Amino acid sequence: MNDIIQQISNLSIGFKSKKGKEISILRKINLNIKKGETVGIVGESGSGKSTLALAMMGFVKQGLFTIDGECKFENLNLLKMSNKDLEEIRGRKIAMIPQNAGQSLTPNLKIGYQIEEALKLHTKLNVSERQKKISELLNKVRLPSPETIALRYPHELSGGQQQRVAIAMALAGNPNLLLLDEPTTGLDVTTQAHVLEVLKDIAKDTGTSMVYVSHDLGAIAQVSDRVVVMYAGEIVLEGPVRKILKDPIHPYANGLLKSIPKLSLKGLPNSMPGSQPQSDKIEIGCSFYERCNISSEKCKKNSPELNYLEEIDVHVRCFNFKDLKDFNKTTEFKNNEFSEKKTSENILKLNNLSISYAKQNFIDQFLGRIKDSNPTVKDINIEINKGETLSLVGESGSGKSTILKSIAGLLKIQDGKIIFNEKDFLSDNLKARSPNNLRAIQLIFQNPDESLNPSHTVEEILSQPLKLYFNLQGQELKKNISDLLQKVRLGDFYMQRYPRQLSGGEKQRVAVARAFAANPDIILCDEVTSALDVSVQAAVLDLLKQLKKDFNTTYIFVSHDLAVVKAISDRVAVLYQGRLCEIGLSESVYKFPSHPYTEVLLGAVLEPDPDIKPRLIAEDIVEERPPEKGCTFQGRCPRILGDKCKNETPPWQIGLNGHAIRCHIEINELDRIQKKELLNGQQK
Amino acid sequence: MNDQVSINNNIKKNPSKFFEVIKTMVSKPSGLIGLSIVCFHILLAIISPLITPHDFKAINPSLMLLPPSSEYWFGTDHLGRDVFTRTILGGRVAILVTFFGSLIALTWGGLLGIFCGLVGGKIDDIVMRIVDAFLAIPWILAMLLIVSILGTSINVLIPALGLFYGKGIVRVARAATHDVIAKDFIVSARARGHSNFSIIWNEILPNVRDAILVEGAMRWSWMLLGFSSLSFLGFGVSPPTPDWGLMISNARGLMSFAHWAVLAPITCLSSLIIGINLSADAFAKALGIDRTTKAPV
């Protein structure tokens, strides 16, 4: 077996609890990495995937220790080696690419210098050879004009470029094994797709083995040859990528794949009940027992072994996998429609909204004026009907959160009006808004860790809006809190809990309950599911749908995840650099004809299916400011017409069902080109 | 469908935070020692009038500067008064004044700091520059000025010390507020339309309270030293009320041949200060604030 580069056998890593009990985080991991192979490790947070990746380079986090087993790299047990010996291996034979490249680059050294440092450390090249190698490396990760990039500082590069530099540095020592820990998680959709493309090419060209750790099955599907699914510190399923993602025979992997919203399917995904057990609570039986829908008595008492099924080359840890219904048969999601009640009653109107972050000079500050000819957000005209779900999508910097904040009254607006209920002008000063208007608009934030006060119990958190808006006291207050908890499917006993004692999904439920406590008309959701695990995300979306039905609220969603947006929205507005590009019913936006930017975005969405490749039709350059004149998207547009796009602001073109696109290209022409290209792409 | 997210009904009740903190504090030797010293001193200050063997102000020239004996455990001073009696009584005023002084410092410093951190902008700028200016004034001169104008009664000393030692707490409270202020739960409270007062009281204070309390404990030991210095200079407690600073000052010239008269009050004063410092550090650690790696200001 000479082609095995790393062999992990029977590896258990854990920590000692306060009472001196050994608690395992990784339990009996057996895994072989072959030469030139890319292995994807998937799992939810807390499944031990990062601990495993670190162990692969002989690193065990402080507080943890190896309980049993070994991790052999070219016949050396990394976990028993001294730090000095490990230095020989790290960087030269095994390299790691961290999640946040921006933080792993030294901010005050130039890119070229940092790569040179890595080269000095790991190779014996002389000065001129090193310079050549730097250009070569930067070329390999497809950074434009390597010579100028090398002279820049990390902060002068975009997130995607920084990640590429990190990859170039990791490649400096010509490693045999590359460990990637969520390398694309913080990046925009288009950037992510490009970085994955680079990684795939590197794997092909250099024959480096890669271990790709991620929670994102879409990314895993694109790069991996083999996939390992982890749950509660164990490998539950392992096998070739197509077998795992197209026909997962473990109930966990099956549920996980079904809980991902997909572009190709309509409606909300199915959620998986429960949450992952904590590592100190696992005693006997299968760790997935409580959430499993095909479990039997046997699973409660006995832990299943990882069995090898020779005919399909898959390892599976389950007694009853044969009972699992055929995955492919269920192509449709159960909950078809997100919204049921729609009216034509207009509840919120954004009229020519412009918002600027520019610092104003003294006189303007004094007069309370905002002057900016090219503001961050400009000319936003959106009407939102009662009971509707509108989503704002776009990459980071597209101004979607900015718009949300201005509706909530947290930002000064430069120009334009926000009209509520067709008569009330909402001021951009919170103090000037009437209590009823304040109550009517509530926010739910992205990260429940930050949006819940850590020193308040759930009861105190929920009592804040109830006391403020309804003046509730005593028993009445308690009853209302209890009702709210019931509505978000949490029990009364949660009242005395602190946020730190709740799981991520539970925290977000409390945040949702707090927003609904005000009995609002409009709820602004700022990336509400992006900090959550996939299986929890589906459950929270399902909850939001239920509540919408009960309260008849209007949602304004902000998200970068186009699949989630598709699952929940009635209408979608696409933003680029703070300008609207396209707006229309969800079904029309996700179909051709679309604005070239929407096309780029949709093309870059990664599906958890290795056979659906992303379409990369535009460069992933990041623009810092919108252009002074012409079309906003002129810098990256793959269909640019020339001077017309650069000088003239494109007109709104109205298609079917009020579907509006802001582009110089005739709407029917767009439709024709896009359909033709798609067809050509499929034929290839 | 899953109607309840979790079926786990038997969650333990949250333990009281106060007892948790005390428990963690005494689990380390330094915390245990510090806390015992502080408790001992406070207890002594409370019960000392009941256990004094002699009258603290009885002057007897025939007993002048006696070395420690079974009758006079710590010897006698230059007026023939019992040093033991005066030492155990000597902490009463100091502890009383500085304890309430720290409370005043804590209150105004903490609230002003949080307020500045919350509102930011021009008000914050102006207030902080005033605080900076205050920090630049030599405190002892300013204290002497206040005391010489208004007198040395407790009613003057407590607010004066409280005023002076609060300015350091303003900075700590402001820095702690800045840590919290950007979090979404504050934004959320703002968007709901809560008043500034409600945001300070409900959202910020519970999160910065720990940092302020630790800082307050440190201020207490500083203030104790400051108060003793005032007494030493003759501007604190007026004789014949016993006080450590005053006792040290009186016996200072006689140190070469009657060291016992200085030794007892010095030991008491320094042990109390060490005790408070040790307790404050243990307190900070028990709350999860690490003073060694993260400076509060």
Image: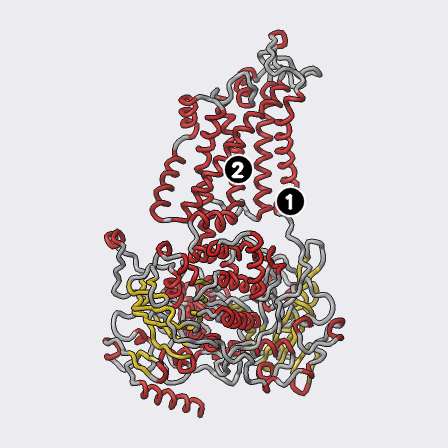
In-front residue for pair B35/A638: B35
Q: Determine whether A562 is above or below A428 in the image.
A: below
What colouring style does the render use? secondary structure
Q: Amino acid at mark 2?
A: Met
Image quadrant assignment for residue B41 = top right
Image x and y of residue A42, in percent: 58, 73
Q: Which residue is mark 1?
A: B19
- Circle 1 SS class: helix
Q: Which residue is mark 2?
A: B218
Residue situated furthest bottom in the rendering: A683
Q: Determine whether A431 is above or below A621 in the image.
A: above
Image x and y of residue A613, in percent: 48, 83
| Label total for image | 2
Q: Amino acid at mark 1?
A: Phe
CB under 8 Å between discs 2 and 1? no
Question: In the rendered view, does A633 fall on the left or right side of A72?
Answer: left
* Residue drawn where x is 52% and y is 38% of the image: B216
Q: Which mark is residue B55?
A: none
Instruction: Decide which of tag 2 and tag 1 comes sooner along the chain.
Output: 1
Image quadrant assignment for residue A127 = bottom left
Is residue A177 at least partly visible in the picture?
no
* Residue drawn where x is 62% and y is 44% of the image: B18
In-front residue for pair A363/A236: A363
User: Callout 2 environment at 10 Å: few (<14), some (14 to 19), or many (20+)?
Assistant: some
